[in-house]
Each structure stands twice: as structure tokens, then as C-alpha cells.
Amino acid sequence: MRNSLRLLLCLFLFASFQLNAQIPKPSDTFGFEVGADYKLADYDQMLAYYEKLAASTDRVQMIDIGKSVMGRPMKLVFISSKKNMKSLDKWREISEKLSRARISPQEARKLADEGKAIVWFDGGMHATERAHAQMTSELMWRIASEESKEMKKIRDNVITLVVPVINPDGVDIVVDWYKKNLGSPYETTNPPILYQKYVGHDNNRDWFMNNMPETRAVTNILYNEWYPQIVHNHHQTSPAWARIFLPPFRSPVNPNIHPGVTTGVNLVGTAMANRFAMKKMPGVISGTAFSMFWNGGMRTTPYYHNQIGILTEVAHATPTPRYYDPKRKPKNVGGKPSNGTEIFYPYPWEGGESHFRDAVDYMLEASMGVLDLAADKKDEFLYNIYDMGKDAINSEEGAFAYVIPTEQWNPSEAMNLTNILMQGGVEAHRALSDFTAGGKSYKAGSIIFMGRQAYRPYLTDLMEKQDYPDQFLYPGGPPQPPYDLAGWTLPMQMGVTVDRIDTEFRNPGERITEKLKPTAGNVSGNADGDFVFSNKDNLSALVVNRLQMQDHTVSQLLADHDGHAAGSFIVEAREGLKSELEEMSNELGIDFSELKTYSEEKSRQLKPIKVGLYKSWQANMDEGWTRWVLEQFEFDLDTLHNIDIREGDLSQYSAIIFPSQRPNGIIHGHRENSMPEKFTGGIGLAGVSAIENYAQNGGTLIFFDAASDMAIEQFGLPVRNVISNLSSSQFFIPGSLIRMNVDTDNRLALGMEGEVAASFNRSRAFQKITQRKSGEGGAEKIADAPEAEAIEVTSYASKDLLMSGWAMGENRYLKNRSAMMHLPYVDGNIVLFGFRPQFRGQPRGTYKLIFNAIYMGAESQ
């Protein structure tokens, strides 16, 4: 008998050894160990490994979930026991039922007992944080192959979902840059371009708008398919001298988040910290920098879906080793004492050698801490997500419903708002008949979002204003900046009318199950005549660009005419025009009507529109977002680098846009010897002179936010930024929505509503001043500039300035100040935006201000 047991044990160990031998390690494909000094695998190597891993064992399955913005495949890997993997659909369905919380508590208890915890990991989002994209291959291998008691428990109780690289394009950009510069003085520098084609670091700021294909692909899995209870988002920007940041986070917490989420985050973070302590891995810090108020990040948006979002930030983001001299250890790390007396930094790191593998090890151990806890408490995590969803459904607080009426100033953005919310898992209905709610009548086709749904926190947070609490670094001191934004209310930003209904009514709608498309418009009138269409809808810009690409002649009304509002576009008659307009109308929902009479005095023909967009070698997210917005509306667009500004033919452009960037970055760029020579320097004074000549000779220059400082300084404009020298204790608006009045008679504001929200991110406010000579207020200037008249286009409101977020000193320093100004400049124009009208692709209500500035540059003189 004893010999038989020994034989069985030997057979079991042999079988385990054989299984491990069959499952390939990442190093078998990469040719080096994950985390090796000076080594990085590129995405092709990673894909090859994922395929080998999935093919080697029935504990792993892999699917495509989408493509990156540059067309690279995005992979989702499932890992669990062989038995669990045979029933993935069952575990997904249980997770959905519990998350949606439309079942009884008794059924929920049964499903929580029966189901498996769903835990999500991702890597590679911020590509210059190089370790996590490398680490995920080893994490998947360990979960699939390791035969420890702990790992068997994890495989039995957890379905692990891994998107090993969430930003494939960025991985290749950064890996290629590192390899090319290995052994040079630029080895540890970052690429001079965005590591995501349009948004770079802001790929972790896109999680409720879902503008990028990568975020859309992941969002669909998180909130419409798999509904994980825990989401672990790996990053690599720990405070200096710490080895890893992990929860608990610092205050404040958003009141829309269920307290079960907040305490769940603390529970997971504490378990991770304890694991590090017992593994003798020092340098774990919590309670600093990152908070739980902002919505829109990969780990924050889950909070509003009753999911536990975990952020870890690990040290050492480069394969190049570094030595930290223990004698130079700071007294404070991340604002915490580093002597072991701080409760959120109890085990300080003392310094010494730091290697890329250290980062990998900390990430792996953090992930194991999450998985171990999830396996031990899988019933609890499964039932809790149900319980929190049920609380949202049963809550008597908040709106009974939100209604988006059919009558909208900008109909396509109302449609977009609906799609954005549905993309995030919110349930929406479309009214099948006219109805009354809250004492107001609504037409059939109105969109209804009922408050009583599991994702009420998400719906509420995006529909309602944010009220960020006052927080200061110390009593009587300056404000403590929020983590990212303080206000982001979508109806305000997008210019969409949404009615909050607090009283009950019968929902006359049917559930919307597919993404909304524009309702076909109308084309009325004689096929042989000119046609006219309104510019109120943002999609009118897309129509203009498509018409011009088809060589149609397009003009714009600058004054009301024949029942058509100023800003409307006229399309000159041509054979076949009506049928072309009908096709556009069906696709985009734009109405066209015959123009009875034409007035040359009230209209201006638009020359073929072509836009130049300045792109610094200092990778600039605002440039990327601007490029993305313009491409969505199919503007003919050229990227202008420093040499193009200095030496190119600028006269071909209707307008040249300078995205928000500090003047020093535009003019001087990277300093000499800080980057390879090709990428140093800026436009220089020669470039400043070139764009001034462009404007004087009829061109239109458009400056967003920080870039306006350069125009004011270099051209000696009769404008000053009135808040430029104020301390944060005097004036502070960190990422909020500010009420802005619009001069709708101004040529640059045609088609705008009279009041809109400006996205104010420590932005600017202008005041006219007496003309000054260039050279005043700065060291380097071009020659004396011509006189320029400053015309106000928009201004910050006189009262109730704060619409959503946090503001200090706004009534004293901001009210009635100019937010956007137009300065005719000899034969051309300069347009200054004190804010960012396209910020992260969110403030759709101010897009037309950009479009109108471009149209002004395209006017035939």
C-alpha cells in the first residue's frame, strides 16, 4: 500500500513536471529573461509568445478584442483551471447577472457560491513605463504553469483576464527608441513623439468618452461582457525612493462611489502591502498623490460600476540599472517620513542597486496579492458587486430618470452622449410615443435613462455637476491639487440639453441595444438650385469638408438671410448635387433646403480648406487631441514640424493651429545634447518671424491656451493674461467647467449658443491693454509688430462662473474677462483661445469656435 502511494505521488509529480515543461517560458521566445538589464521584447515577440502559451495548455485561451489605432491586434487572455476553462460562458453569465443586479438576493447568494471571481490585469498602457508590458507574459506563464498550493487555489476559484498590452503601438515606439539609443547618452530618454498616435499619456484619461479604439475595446469587455469584480491597472510612476505605490488612496473620494467599493479598494491594497512586508520587500507606500474622486481613468471608472479598481505604481521604468546612494536617502518620500514611523510607509527602502527585474518582481507580487485574496474571498466579492448594484437600483436618492429631448441645438452630440453612456454599460430607452415627465412634455424618440439601475453611480456622475471639496496642503496654505480633473459633467461640455426628472413616471420606451446612428435628414427643393444647411450641428463641418473634397463650391452666410441664420452654409448648384446631398443627409442626419435667393453681400465663398497643425518634438498630447478632432471631421490637415514652420510654404494653409504648449517649448524645444540633434530646438525666432509674415499676408493663426502666451509675447499684442502672476492661494481652477458667454453675432461664434461651458485647466483670461511694442515683457522678441485691435469673441460669465468642479478666486479675477479674442493682423488674423476648446475630445460644445476660426481663414477676400 505504501509503495502504491509512493508510486502515485511520483506519477503526479512527473505529470506536473511534464505539464510545466510543455508550457513555454517567455524567455524561450524572447531570448532573455523578463526584466533582464538592457533588454526589451517588442510586440511581435510578445504576440508570438502569447500564441505559444495559448497553444501549449488547456488552462489558457486567447481572443482578439479589437485593434489599436494603428491597426495592431489587441489580445485578451483567459487563465484558469482546465475544468473552469470548459465553462467560460457560464462564469461570464454569472458575473453579468450579479453585476446587473436584476435578480433576487437568494439567487445572488446561490450564484456567488457557484461562480468564480473575475479578476482583470492589464499592462503596457503607458509605454514609457516599460516593465508592465514585459511583466504580463511572465504573470500569465506563472498562473498557467505553477503547481504551488496557492496557485492551484487561484486557478480553481478565479477566472483571470489579462490584456497583456493595452497599447501595442506605444510598446513598439518605445522599444524601438530604446534599442536605437542603447549605449548612447540618450539611452534613458523618451521618444520625441506620442506613444499613442493621438493621445500619448492621455490614453488613461479616455475611459468615459472612449474616443480611442483601445479604450472602446477594453470598456466593452469590462462593462458589457465580463464585469470583473477587481480591475488591476499596472503603472510605473512611484514616488522617488519608494518601490511601489498601492492603495489605500488619499482623500477625497467621490460621493457617487459606493462605500463598499472604497473599503474594498482598501482591503485589497492592505492585503497587497502585507504580502510585501512578509516577503521582505520594502518601499511600499500608500495614501499619497492618487485619490478616488476623478472619473475617467482605467482604474477609476470601474468604481462607478461597483468594481474594485486597483492602481499600482512601481519604480524603475527603464531596463538601464541605477544606483541609489543610501547616504542620500531623503527624509521624506512621497510626503511621508522615511524613518519607519509613517503608517502608510512603514518599511522604507534604504537604497542601493535598482534593476529592471526589481520592477517586474514587485508587479508580479502585487498581482499575486490580488489573486490570492480574490481566491480566498471569491464568494464575498461576487455577492458584494450584486449588493452594491442592488443598492443603486433600490436607492431613493438621486434622479428618477434623465431625459434627452429630441429638440437639441446640436443633435449629433445628443446622439453621441447617448452612445457614450451605453458604451459604459448604462441602460438606455427610446420613447415610442409622446409622454409627460416632471411636468414637461416630450416627443417620441426622446432618450430616457432610468435612475434605478446598477450603474446609477456612473450615470449620475457623468450627468450631474461635480462639487469638489476644498482641500489645502496645510491649514492656511495653498490648495492641494486634485488628481487630474475636478469637474467633467458631460451635458455641460457637450452642449446637450438633458432634463433631470425627480418624480416617477411611466417609462414609454424600449431598451436600446445597438449604437445610435443619425436619423436621416431631409433634402427639400429644386434639384437645379443652390442648397443651404445650418452650421448648428458639429457634423456640418464634416459636410463642408466632404463637399469641398468633391470640388463643390461652398460659401458661408455671415448674416441672416432669407430665413437662414448667419453661419449657415450654401452649396452652389451643380448637376447631381441633390442626389449627393441626399446621400449625406441619410448618413449624417443633416437637413438641406433650396436657397431661394443668393446674397453676395451677406456671404463669403470658402477657398479649399487646408489646415496646418504645429507639432513640437516635445511630445504634446494637446497636439494629438487637436489632430484627432480635426481628422474626425475630415479636415485636410498637414503636420508642421519646426523646419516646416521656418522654411515651408505657409501660404497654402487656411489656418495654422498651435496647440496648448508653453512658449519655451515652442520656440526652443529640447535643449542641445538632451536628445539626438534632429529632435532638439524649436521654431526659433526665424519661425516666429515666419508665422508673423504668414499672418500679415492674410493667414490665420490660432493659439490654444498656453500657446497664446507666445503670441502675446512675441507679437506685442494689446492683450494680457490677467491671471498669469497670481498664486494658487489667490486663484485656482484645476480642471473644471466654467460658464462662458458667447457673442453670437461675432463671425467666429456663428452657430454657437449664447452660453457654453469652457474647459478650464489652469488656463488663461485676457484683458485688452494699450498697444505695446514687441520686446516689452520678454528677452527675445521679433521686430516691432503692427498695431492690432483686440475683439472679444467669448467672455467668462459675470456670475455663477463655476459650473462643475472646483474654483477659488474666480469672482475676483475671472468674471467678465475675455476667454477668446480675435485680433485682425494687417491682412490676416490672430485668434487666441484662453482655454482648450478640444480638451481630450470632450468639450464638443466649443468645437465650432475652432471650425469658425478655420473658415475665417478660408474666406475669399
Image (spheres, rainbow, N blue to C red):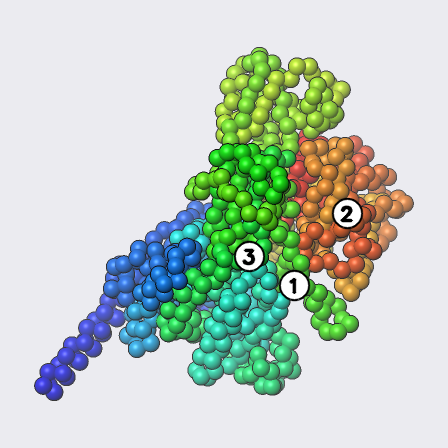
Left or right of 149, for residue 383: right
Marks 1 & 2, CB-CB < 8 Å contact: no
Q: Quadrant of the C terminus?
A: top right
Instruction: Residue 787: give x, y in percent of width and height.
Output: 86, 39
Q: Quadrant of the N terminus?
A: bottom left
Q: Can residue 37 be seen by looking at this rendering?
A: no
Please determine whether, in this image, residue 797 is positioned above or below residue 483: above
Q: Residue at x 35, y 61 (%)?
A: 107
Q: Nearer the viewer, residue 522 or 763?
A: 522
Marks 2 and 3 sit apart, C-alpha to C-alpha, by 37 Å
Q: Which residue is mark 1?
A: 482
Element under disc 2:
strand
Instruction: Residue 374: give x, y in percent of width and height.
Output: 39, 70
- In terms of image quadrants, where is residue 80? bottom left
Element under disc 1:
loop
Element under disc 3:
loop
Sequence-wise first label, 2 or 3: 3
Q: Nearer the viewer, residue 543 or 100?
A: 100
Circle 1: residue type: Pro
Q: Which residue is mark 2?
A: 796
